[in-house]
């Protein structure tokens, strides 16, 4: 009996002419046409033939109530669909998928079979698959898989394989007990059923949450059975699926229980199936980091097989070349890299001297080999015996050359990580990187966009800068300007490393100068506002080191460092020993700021040229630089007193004075005032020769008093014209800044400042303390002359030096006389 179900050959244009709209204009017309077509087809059954003039006719007949018509219509559709994708698209547009999805549940076995075959064939087309996503067909397909019908299982799983690539369908398959059905079908006698089921499982396993259910259903056992399939495609897909499952953290115990590694090692031992070795090693690579799995692999000979590939044994290399798979070496190295991540496995690898193999491969291997070689190097370099062996093997120059030549970001990242590990606590290795030309290469790496690369490069530069012998040479490679941009990053590790590197570099004057010139002070100071505590601590450390000179300290003040640190000092949550140290450092190296903020200078705070007294600086008040103070217009505020001595030449000739015609010239005049220089010269000549500190203090006090207007009786203080004198100087200079050498009528604060400056100049120790209402005084330590007690002689007493009323008189610091001197 011959059945003709194929359609006459036709073009796409003729198929379009056979659309459903041309055969039926409304529902009633469609029903009449179905009945007429059904009767016509039935009338031809006696002639042993069912004929459909067009594919649209077959689609139309899917709505028939006649069993034979439905059987033949489904058969005609899947045979037409098999001829190509354009036919599948045409049938989809004609609406074949909806009726077919309903017919797979038909009571007639042949109808079910033909319908599901048609669905499976059409689902392989992207257009048809997209249409199927809108049809709730998955539950019906999964239900049919339980039937003992190979054709239904084959095409049902084919349909699921196509649909399972979509996440929404994956959920449906799982919720309808599809995983269990598919696992059972892995043991099917039909290889197509096996392959389609395996493809579907592979798609589902992409979601790691499915792994526990798959393992519980003994799915791994089914995969191992498929490894022995006679079909290469099934074997490869089974290995790919095992690879995904092996990445699931809790799968290792199941792998060991099912003795998966025995089967994998058996494949690696079989030189006749080299085409499976790559995927087999990829499965192992996801297991090697587990210590127990590694031991089982090693015991079974798996580690030896991997090392054979790495060592490029002649017989193995010949097999690789014969099969055209030269990347197998890189995959073997990936297994080693995976194992090296586990500190418990690192001793096993060290016993095999894997470090020697890595150095050889990194010297001349392919890029893919270098990727995994650097990965293994990065982890093993943290293991002390491997670190020592790497150094002995001359690995560091190899890695530095690799950094210079490689354009692969992954290679660079892992190479840097390994070098960071090698130099941790090891100055010799750090010096090796320097000798290999590391600074130049690492500075170039700071231009990269990968945070890990930039952070590790900065770490290495910082470690080199930490060695005083080579610090200046490191700076000469342009490290400091290169760090400015990383200071603006958002990545916290980059910021921390950049700040710590600055801490090492800024011990050199040249580095601090370069940081100012490269405009790096502002971003560094801004990091004091960071809410990240480690960034804040590192910023405080950098500020502390950079405050070693006044220009840098003032630059930091210009951008608000002092105000920020003062705010932090009032915060319970943010204040710590680092912020306190930073504030102290800012004041230690900037005596002017310290005196303005704290109101006192200890004996070790030395006043030098350039010191200025702005008066008391309020909490969190913006601190102006000296240049800004000089540029302010004359006002009624307290003048700034400036220590502006100029060194004299050997012949005592003073430099030319500038004119006062502009603000710039006015500032120059302040710097060129010679009065204080002459005073310093006179003090050195007259006071230094005196014997005994006390005599020197007395002489210095009388000298200061004479210069500043002489002694003033207490009752005459109100008539002493010091305020008028200062106003006259301000008008004369047209500036609020007055050189102390020009003051001839000085009050307590001016005399105490001059006394401190001159004492520091000749090596006498004294303090400078600010009081209220323009009061200030100096404290000195002296032994009591009338003390006969040896114990008292060894304990000097603190005295205040009178510079106003009885010049050179000493008052005990806690006495009534001292209190009266300090206050109104």
Image (tube, helix red, strand yellow):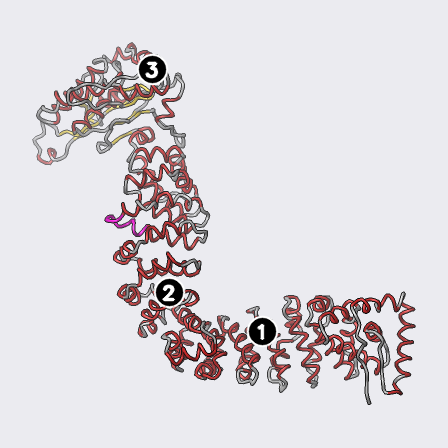
Position of residue 254 measured from the top left corner of the image (x, y, whole percent): 49, 78
Is residue 142 rendered to the left or right of residue 107? left
Asked whether residue 68 appears in the rendered view, the answer is: yes
Instruction: Categorize mark 1 by other alpha carbons within 10 Å: few (<14), some (14-19), many (20+).
Output: many
Q: Which residue is mark 2?
A: 379
Residue in view at x 69 percent, y 79 percent? 155
Is residue 240 rendered to the left or right of residue 155? left
Q: Classify mark 2: helix, strand or loop.
A: helix
Q: Nearer the viewer, mark 3 or mark 2?
A: 3
- The CA distance from mark 1 to mark 2 is 31 Å
Q: Nearer the viewer, mark 1 or mark 3?
A: 3
Q: Classify mark 3: helix, strand or loop.
A: loop
Instruction: Categorize mark 2 by other alpha carbons within 10 Å: few (<14), some (14-19), many (20+).
Output: many
Name the foreground residue: 123 vs 729. 123
Name the foreground residue: 212 vs 450. 450
Q: Would you say residue 519 sits in the magenta stretch? A: no
Q: Which residue is mark 3?
A: 660
Is residue 105 rendered to the left or right of residue 735? right
Give the number of callouts: 3
Instruction: Categorize mark 3 by other alpha carbons within 10 Å: few (<14), some (14-19), many (20+).
Output: some
Asked whether residue 584 appears in the rendered view, the answer is: no
Name the foreground residue: 651 vs 313. 313
Q: Which residue is mark 1?
A: 202
Is residue 600 shown above or below 521?
A: above
- Identify the magenta region: 462-470
Q: Classify mark 1: helix, strand or loop.
A: helix
- The CA distance from mark 1 to mark 3 is 88 Å
Q: Which mark is residue 34?
A: none
**N-terminal-most mark, 1 or 2:** 1
- Asked if the residues shown at circle 3 and circle 2 are in contact, with their CB atoms under 8 angstroms apart, the answer is no
Position of residue 356 measured from the top left corner of the image (x, y, whole percent): 31, 70
């Amino acid at each position: 009996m011959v059945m003709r179900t194929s359609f006459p050959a036709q073009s796409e244009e003729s198929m379009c002419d056979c659309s459903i709209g041309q055969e039926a204009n409304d529902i009633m017309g469609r029903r009449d046409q179905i009945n007429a077509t059904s009767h016509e087809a039935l009338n031809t059954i006696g002639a042993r033939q069912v004929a459909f003039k067009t594919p649209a006719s077959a689609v139309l007949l899917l709505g028939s109530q006649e069993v034979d018509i439905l059987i033949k219509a489904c058969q005609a559709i899947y045979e037409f669909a098999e001829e190509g994708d354009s036919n599948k698209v045409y049938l989809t547009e004609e609406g074949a998928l909806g009726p077919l999805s309903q017919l797979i549940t038909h009571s007639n076995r042949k109808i079910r079979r033909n319908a599901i075959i048609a669905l499976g064939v059409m689902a392989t087309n992207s257009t048809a698959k997209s249409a199927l996503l809108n049809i709730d067909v998955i539950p019906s397909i999964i239900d049919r898989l339980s039937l003992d019908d190979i054709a239904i299982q084959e095409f049902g799983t084919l349909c699921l394989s196509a649909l399972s690539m979509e996440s929404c369908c994956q959920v449906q398959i799982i919720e309808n007990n599809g995983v269990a059905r598919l696992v059972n079908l892995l043991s099917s006698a039909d290889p197509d059923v096996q392959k389609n089921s395996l493809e579907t499982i592979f798609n589902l396993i992409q979601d790691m949450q499915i792994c526990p259910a798959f393992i519980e259903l003994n799915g791994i056992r089914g995969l191992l059975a498929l490894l022995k399939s006679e079909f290469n495609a099934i074997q490869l897909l089974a290995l790919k699926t095992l690879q995904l499952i092996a990445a699931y953290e809790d799968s290792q115990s199941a792998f060991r229980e099912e003795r998966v590694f025995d089967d994998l090692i058996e494949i690696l031992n079989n030189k006749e199936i080299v085409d499976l070795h790559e995927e087999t090693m990829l499965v192992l690579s996801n297991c090697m980091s587990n210590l127990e799995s590694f031991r089982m692999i090693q015991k079974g000979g798996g580690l030896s097989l991997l090392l054979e590939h790495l060592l490029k044994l002649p017989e193995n290399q010949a097999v690789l070349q014969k099969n055209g798979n030269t990347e197998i070496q890189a995959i073997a190295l990936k297994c080693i890299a995976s194992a090296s991540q586990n500190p418990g496995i690192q001793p096993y690898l060290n016993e095999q001297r894997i470090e020697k193999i890595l150095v050889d491969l990194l010297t001349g291997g392919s890029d893919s080999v270098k990727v995994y070689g650097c990965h293994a190097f990065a982890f093993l370099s943290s293991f002390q015996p491997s670190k020592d062996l790497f150094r002995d093997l001359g690995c560091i120059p190899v890695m530095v050359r690799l950094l210079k030549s490689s354009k692969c970001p992954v290679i660079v990242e892992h190479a840097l990580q390994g070098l960071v590990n090698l130099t941790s606590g090891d100055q010799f290795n750090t010096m090796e990187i320097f000798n290999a030309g590391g600074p130049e290469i690492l500075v170039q790496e700071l231009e990269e966009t990968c945070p890990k690369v930039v952070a590790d490069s900065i770490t290495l530069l910082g470690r080199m800068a930490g060695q005083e012998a080579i610090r200046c040479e490191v700076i000469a490679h342009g490290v400091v300007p290169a760090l400015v941009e990383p200071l603006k990053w958002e990545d916290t590790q980059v910021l921390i490393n950049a700040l710590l590197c600055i801490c090492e570099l800024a011990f050199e004057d040249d580095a601090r100068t370069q940081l100012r010139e490269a405009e790096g002070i502002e971003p560094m100071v801004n990091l004091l506002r960071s809410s990240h505590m480690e960034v804040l601590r590192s910023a405080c450390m950098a500020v502390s080191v950079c405050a070693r000179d006044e220009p840098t300290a003032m630059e930091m003040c210009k951008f608000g460092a002092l105000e920020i640190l003062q705010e932090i000092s009032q915060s319970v949550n943010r204040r710590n020993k680092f912020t306190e140290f930073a504030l102290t450092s800012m004041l230690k190296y900037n005596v002017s700021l310290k005196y303005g903020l704290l109101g006192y200078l200890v004996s070790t705070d030395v006043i030098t040229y350039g010191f200025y007294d702005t008066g008391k600086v309020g909490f969190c008040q913006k601190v102006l630089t000296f240049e800004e103070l000089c540029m302010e217009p004359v006002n009624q505020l307290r003048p700034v007193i400036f220590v502006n001595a100029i060194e004299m030449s050997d012949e005592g000739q003073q430099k030319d004075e500038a004119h006062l015609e502009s603000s710039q010239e006015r500032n120059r005049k302040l710097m060129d005032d010679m009065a204080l220089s002459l005073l310093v010269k006179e003090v050195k000549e007259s006071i230094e020769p005196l014997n005994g500190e006390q005599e020197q203090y007395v002489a210095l006090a009388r000298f200061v008093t004479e210069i500043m207007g002489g002694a003033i009786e207490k009752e005459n203080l109100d008539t002493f014209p010091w305020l008028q004198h200062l106003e006259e100087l301000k008008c004369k200079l047209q500036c609020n800044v007055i050189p102390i050498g020009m003051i001839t009528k000085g009050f307590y604060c001016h005399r105490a400042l001059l006394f401190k400056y001159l004492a520091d100049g000749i090596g006498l120790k004294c303090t400078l303390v600010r009081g209220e209402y323009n009061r200030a005084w100096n404290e000195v330590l002296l032994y009591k002359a009338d003390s006969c007690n040896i114990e008292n002689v060894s304990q000097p007493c603190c005295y205040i030096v009178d510079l106003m009323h009885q010049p050179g008189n000493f008052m005990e610091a806690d006495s009534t006389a001292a209190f009266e001197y300090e206050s109104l």
